[in-house]
């Protein structure tokens, strides 16, 4: 069942080809950078910054932080001094792209129809743009009245992966608080939108021509259309991007936590943010990795589910950022474990005290679901997301 629709801004909601907008943005960026720094190779500097998003990442840093650090290093300016220059850039250059920011036919009616049905809507854009750019483009495109109603706006400041990386879409759904097969991505680029989203397990609606958005509008007006989308078969290729995307979503939320919020509880029967982090770090090795290793080692083992900790679970540390880093390191260890598995390993059987007959693939997928459960819990604690869908 569909609970959220992810609308690609660049290639479906705007009546222009995505590359045209990107090229306009890039020219304006290079011109401003040359004016601010005097360098004559600004375009290549910007290109190298974007390439950094596709390389090995620490996942803790947002796309914006990675790009800013890369550009500052290239122009030999400390990040602290370069930030104000970049800020003025983002305030001034978007106007140069306004001529290509027009709403696609049926875009407004589609958004209204989806909101009327109580669905969550996320705006998906190339995560090299800051939120200020996304907001301006939405206003120019006649979609500004809906901004406060959107569940999430992806941007360089809150995302941790390039758009063509399946982990980007895994991070998106974790931030919204849904499972992959509960999302419908409306995208116009097969390579950068639909294919990576399908790798994670999302449903997709391709925008291949000028009538595709209108066809989708007709589709969503049929009663019960959301229920026509069933769960996708599990595939081992879903796991790596979900494990990484969940990390990105977690660190994105943690970057918004104020010092006084770490130990606050929204309710006496709920966990604090620190307790959530302690639980994630503890169970990654003591439960999730141990369970996978047992299935690999023992023929058809019995897996007993442990009772969940209560609200009085002890806090493992007074340094939450260190706990988050501990979880990240343990998750990377889990990724190393699954990277070594062959096709026959994923199908190794097991018996679970709650799920019954299962296999290693299903147990690994449960780890990704466990992540999203507690990411949503953290999001609710911060008041940074909608009520559970």
Image (cartoon, rainbow, N blue to C red):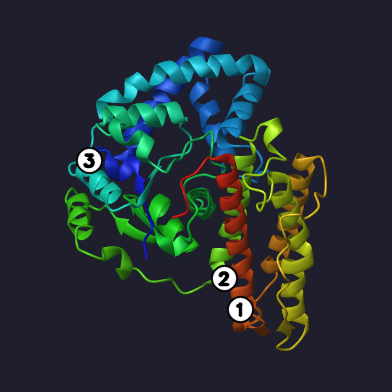
| Sooner in the amino-acid sequence: mark 2 or mark 3 | 3
Secondary structure found at label 3? helix
Of the 4 image quadrants, the one containing the C terminus is: bottom left
Residue on which disc 3 sits = 108
Residue depicted at 61% across the width and 17% down the height? 82
Contact? badges 1 and 2 (CB < 8 Å): yes
Structural distance between the alpha carbons of marks 1 and 2: 8 Å
Secondary structure found at label 1? helix
| Sooner in the amino-acid sequence: mark 1 or mark 2 | 2
Eye-nearest disc, 2 or 3 = 3
Structural distance between the alpha carbons of marks 3 and 1: 45 Å
Q: Which mark is residue 236?
A: 2
Q: Which mark is residue 110?
A: none
> Residue 220: x, y in percent?
23, 58
Residue depicted at 73% across the width and 50% down the height? 275
Work out whether residue 202 can be spotted: no
Contact? badges 2 and 3 (CB < 8 Å): no
Left or right: residue 18 compared with residue 344: left
Residue depicted at 47% across the width and 17% down the height? 89
Residue on which disc 1 sits = 343
> Residue 1: x, y in percent?
37, 66
């Amino acid at each position: 069942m569909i609970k959220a629709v992810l609308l690609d801004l660049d290639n479906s909601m705007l009546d222009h080809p995505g590359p045209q907008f990107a090229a306009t943005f890039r020219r304006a960026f290079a011109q401003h950078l040359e004016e601010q720094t005097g360098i004559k190779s600004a375009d290549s500097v910007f290109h190298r910054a974007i390439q950094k998003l596709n390389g090995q990442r620490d996942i803790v840093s947002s796309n914006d932080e990675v790009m800013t650090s890369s550009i500052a290093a290239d122009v030999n300016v400390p990040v602290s001094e370069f930030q104000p220059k970049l800020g003025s850039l983002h305030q001034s250059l978007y106007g140069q792209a306004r001529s290509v920011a027009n709403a696609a036919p049926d875009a407004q009616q589609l958004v209204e129809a989806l909101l009327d049905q109580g669905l969550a809507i996320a705006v998906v854009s190339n995560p090299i743009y800051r939120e200020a750019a996304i907001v301006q483009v939405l206003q120019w495109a006649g979609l500004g009245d809906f901004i406060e109603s959107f569940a999430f706006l992806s941007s360089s400041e809150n995302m941790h992966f390039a758009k063509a990386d399946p982990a980007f879409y895994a991070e998106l759904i974790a931030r919204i608080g849904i499972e992959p097969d509960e999302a419908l991505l409306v995208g116009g680029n097969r390579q950068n939108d639909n294919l990576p989203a399908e790798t994670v397990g999302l449903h997709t609606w391709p925008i291949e021509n000028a009538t595709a958005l209108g066809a989708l509008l007709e589709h969503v007006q049929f009663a019960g259309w959301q229920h026509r989308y069933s769960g996708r078969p599990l595939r081992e290729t879903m796991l790596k991007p979900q494990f990484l995307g969940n990390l990105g979503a977690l660190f994105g939320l943690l970057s918004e936590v104020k010092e006084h919020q770490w130990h606050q509880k929204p309710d006496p029967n709920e966990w604090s943010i620190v307790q959530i982090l302690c639980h994630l770090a503890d169970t990654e090795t003591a439960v999730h990795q141990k369970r996978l290793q047992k299935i690999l080692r023992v023929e058809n083992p019995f897996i007993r589910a442990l009772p969940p900790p209560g609200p009085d679970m002890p806090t493992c540390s007074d340094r939450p950022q260190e706990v988050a880093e501990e979880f990240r390191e343990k998750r990377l260890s889990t990724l190393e474990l699954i990277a070594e598995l062959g096709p026959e390993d994923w199908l190794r059987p097991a018996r679970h005290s709650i799920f019954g007959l299962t296999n290693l693939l299903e147990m690994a997928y449960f780890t990704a679901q466990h992540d999203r459960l507690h990411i949503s819990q953290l999001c609710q604690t911060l008041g940074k997301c909608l009520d559970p869908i």
